[in-house]
Amino acid sequence: MKILVTGGLGYIGSHVTTLLLEKSVDVISVDNLENSRIEVLDGIKEITGKQPIFKQLDIRDENALKNLFKDHTDIDGVIHFAAYKAVGESVKQPLRYYHNNIVGLLNLLNSIAKIGIPLIFSSSCTVYGQADKLPIKESASILPAASPYGYSKQVGEQFVKDTCKAHKNFNAILLRYFNPIGAHPSVKIGEQPQGVPQNLVPFLTQTAIGKHPVLKIFGSDYDTPDGTCIRDYIHVMDLAEAHINSLEYLISSKNTSKCETFNVGTGKGVSVLEVIQTFEKVSGKKVPYQFTEPRDGDTVAAFADVEMIEQKIGWKAKYTLEEALKNAWDWEKNH
Ligand code: NAD
Ligand code: WQD
């Protein structure tokens, strides 16, 4: 089997690639290296003893993508990660985000829909905004997006659904990730945010190692048991495995409709303070923190209903929050 992974040297794509290679699947990895480094290939090789076929390619370049499919006529499936992902940056640079996340996806759909290569699309819990009911089911309403990034995922989902309807041999799965954290347990690959991280866990590990004097907790007075926001933090290896299982499900035609949507989370809600306390326990480090004003656009609480992916695909998160934070910390210390 041969799988194309776009954004294959990024955070999630690199972890998925290791699992594919370990299953003896051939991987073609494409990445423009805008938010990743070529050295990630070394980490993948150290873990698996193998390397994907790598092409430095920008998926906005339609001809380059078409040529890739001409050169590789035996691709059995695509996992599509290549996109920009920073919510705050997308508010400041909406056109840059729309251009990359939309044009890239359209080019890809143009290359694969007619020939019926199945697709796994990276979507996000961000499409739900603040859901009225917790845990969040896939059937929850999609509220107006709070950011251009979020809108690019809502629109992306719709493009994939419409394309599935129009092409009888084309099937897809939309995976809505909750909050991916952690690193490969070998800590040879992990998350490499550029600049100051906006996400909680990389900022936390960077604070613990001394890169920042203090971690700001955005809001202390939310309507939650300890006043801080609640999220569903999922180990990146669990998330990676969800892709493998989804791909197997799709390729073996177990799907019950042409485009299915699944939440990928642990199903457990954890507060910011609980993350910090758990981190302190597993790392033995005290993390200086202070409460500040809530961050614009933050939802109070979001965690996944994972019944659907468990029942249909047979996937369930295995790693604990402790393991995820320990791997994140070891990665911070080692890389
Ligand atoms: P990442 O930035 O680490 O990985 C994306 C990779 O795609 C990077 O290596 C980047 O260089 C590459 N890329 C970007 N634009 C490209 C282009 N035009 N052509 C070729 N390569 C390109 O991000 P990630 O955390 O691995 O996220 C992967 C996907 O999952 C994204 O679509 C993201 O929106 C989605 N997602 C991420 C999270 C998260 O918190 N990490 C949550 C939900 C959804
Ligand atoms: C988690 C919690 C913050 C940093 C984002 C995207 C979402 C998805 C996942 C891509 C929140 C708090 C954070 C800090 C803090 N990505 N926090 N101090 O916002 O849930 O989700 O990543 O699709 O679309 O929005 O994740 O890690 O930024 O925040 O107190 O320095 O930590 O307020 O409650 P978020 P996050």
Image: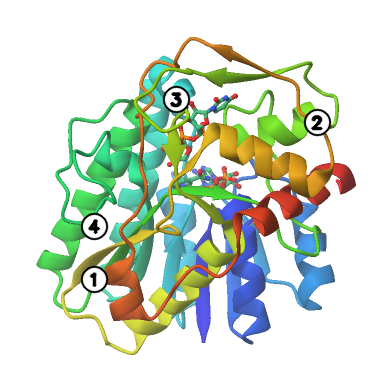
Residue that mark 2 sits on = 286
Residue that mark 3 sits on = 227
Inter-mark Cα distance, 3 to 1: 50 Å
Name the mark nearer the viewer: 2 or 1: 2
Inter-mark Cα distance, 2 to 3: 21 Å
At label 3, counting other C-alpha atoms closer than 10 Å, the crowd grade (few under 14, some 14-19, many 20 or more) is some
Inter-mark Cα distance, 2 to 1: 55 Å
Mark 2 / mark 4, whichever is N-terminal: 4
Tell me the SS state at disc 3. loop
Inter-mark Cα distance, 2 to 4: 45 Å
- Residue 156 image offset from top left, x and y in percent: 28, 47
Mark 3 / mark 1, whichever is N-terminal: 1
In the foreground, 320 or 211: 320
- Residue 314 image offset from top left, x and y in percent: 38, 81
Residue that mark 1 sits on = 114
Mark 2 / mark 1, whichever is N-terminal: 1
- Residue 303 image offset from top left, x and y in percent: 37, 48
